[in-house]
Amino acid sequence: MAARLAGIEVPKFPDTETSFDELKARLAKTTDFVKSVKPAQIDGSENREIVIPVPNQPLTFTGQSYLIHFALPNLHFHATAAYAILRHCGVEVGKRDYIGKLPS
């Protein structure tokens, strides 16, 4: 999401992780990348053309439409799916784990 809105190349990481340590390292690389994108790179991207390459016909959005109608719904879908899988597998996570710490 950050790369597309900033108009820079989307990083590609090989999908070869086989352990939690490797998954944590992949998350750290992703977090480092997102933190490297400066707000100024995204500012004004609401009208930038965003093209998602998918088989048969690429999806084309404006930056704002991409964020609201594609990227954020995908983020929430994957977060809730992971949460549900963890709960199904017996991991004791609850609503506070999903939502995070509430402001005091």
Image (cartoon, rainbow, N blue to C red):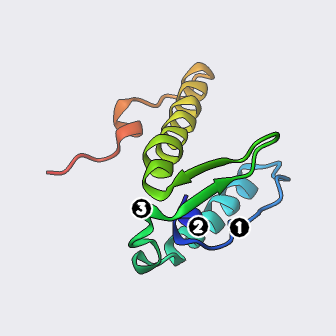
Residue drawn at (23%, 46%) of the image: 102
Is 90 on the left-hand or right-hand side of 65?
right
Residue under pointer 1: 11
Residue 50: x %, y % from top left: 59, 58
Percent x, y of residue 49: 56, 61
- Identify the residue at the far left of this view: 104
Query: How busy is the neighbourhood of tag 1: few (under 14 within 10 Å), some, or many (20 plus)?
Result: few
Q: Which of marks 3 and 1 is nearer the N terminus?
A: 1
Residue named by callout 2: 3
Between the C-alphas of marks 3 and 2, the distance is 14 Å
Secondary-structure class at tag 1: loop
Residue projecting furthest to the top: 88
- Give the residue at mark 3: 46
Seen in the picture, residue 89 relative to 77 is either above or below; the reply is: above
**In-image side of 43 versus 10 (left or right):** left
Given the image, on which type of amino acid does mark 3 rest?
Glu
Q: Nearer the viewer, residue 7 or 84?
A: 7
Residue drawn at (49%, 38%), measured in percent from left and top? 73
The residue sitting at 47% across, 41% down in the picture is 69
Mark number displayed over residue 32: none
Q: Which of marks 1 and 2 is nearer the N terminus?
A: 2
Q: Which of marks 3 and 2 is nearer the N terminus?
A: 2
Within-10-Å neighbours for mark 2: few <14, some 14–19, many 20+: some
